[in-house]
Each structure stands twice: as C-alpha cells, then as structure tokens.
Amino acid sequence: MALQLAYYRQYGEPCPTYESASTRGFLHGRTETVRSCSVDSVTFTKAFDDKDIKVSYLIIIQVLIFG
C-alpha cells in the first residue's frame, strides 16, 4: 500500500503493482504473481489523501478491505 500511495501521489494514477507468491508447498509448486492493485486498494489510496475523509473512516476501509 505504501508503494501504491507513493506512486499515486507522484503521478496521480494507480500503479500496476504485482508481487511474487510462492506455491512451493503444493505439488509442482512454483512462483506465481499476485496483483495487489485492485479497485479496493485504489479506493483506499484516493481516500488516504482526501482531506474531507476522517481517519476513523480510513481505518474502517482498511479493515473491511484487508482484514
């Protein structure tokens, strides 16, 4: 989220973020990619810099989206 927020602040648009995920514990496991930039993460990123949104609302969004 920090990388997405920094990129959004710099360029004004969400970045195409993906991370590696190991599936080694499974039969024929290998490295896969997880795309962490989603509609929900973009909503959180935009809300983070919105001065009209209270901090308590950001915490609620984060809990609902990311658990």
Image (tube, grey):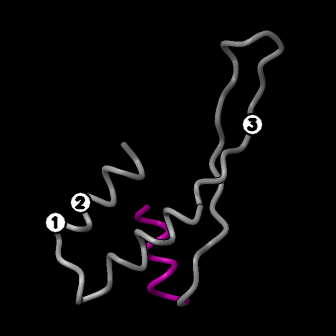
Residue drawn at point x = 49 percent, y = 63 percent: 41
Marks 1 and 3, how far apart at CA: 35 Å
What kind of element bears circle 1? helix
Q: Position of residue 56 (x, y in %)?
A: 16, 66
What kind of element bears circle 2? helix
What kind of element bears circle 3? strand
On the image, which quarter does residue 13 sit in?
Answer: bottom right
> What is the span of residues highlighted in magenta in the rendered image?
1-11
Residue drawn at point x = 33 percent, y = 60 percent: 61
- Left or right: 1 in relation to 53: right
> Which badge, 2 or 3, comes first in the chain's sequence?
3
- Left or right: 66 in relation to 52: right
Q: Can you identify the residue that label 2 sits on?
A: 59
- Left or right: 10 in relation to 58: right
Q: Can you identify the residue that label 1 sits on?
A: 56
Marks 1 and 2, how far apart at CA: 5 Å
Q: Label 1 amino acid? A: Ser
Q: Is 40 covered by the magenta stretch? A: no
Q: Position of residue 54 (x, y in %)?
A: 17, 77
Q: Can you identify the residue that label 3 sits on?
A: 32
Between residue 64 and residue 6, name the one nearer to us.
64
Q: What is the number of callouts on the image?
A: 3
Q: Label 3 amino acid? A: Glu
Instruction: Tell me, yes or no, whether the two marked residues, 1 and 2, touch with CB atoms within 8 Å.
Output: yes
Circle number at residue 40: none
Q: Label 2 amino acid? A: Ile
Q: Position of residue 2 (x, y in %)?
A: 40, 64
Query: With respect to residue 38, does 21 lie above or below?
Result: above
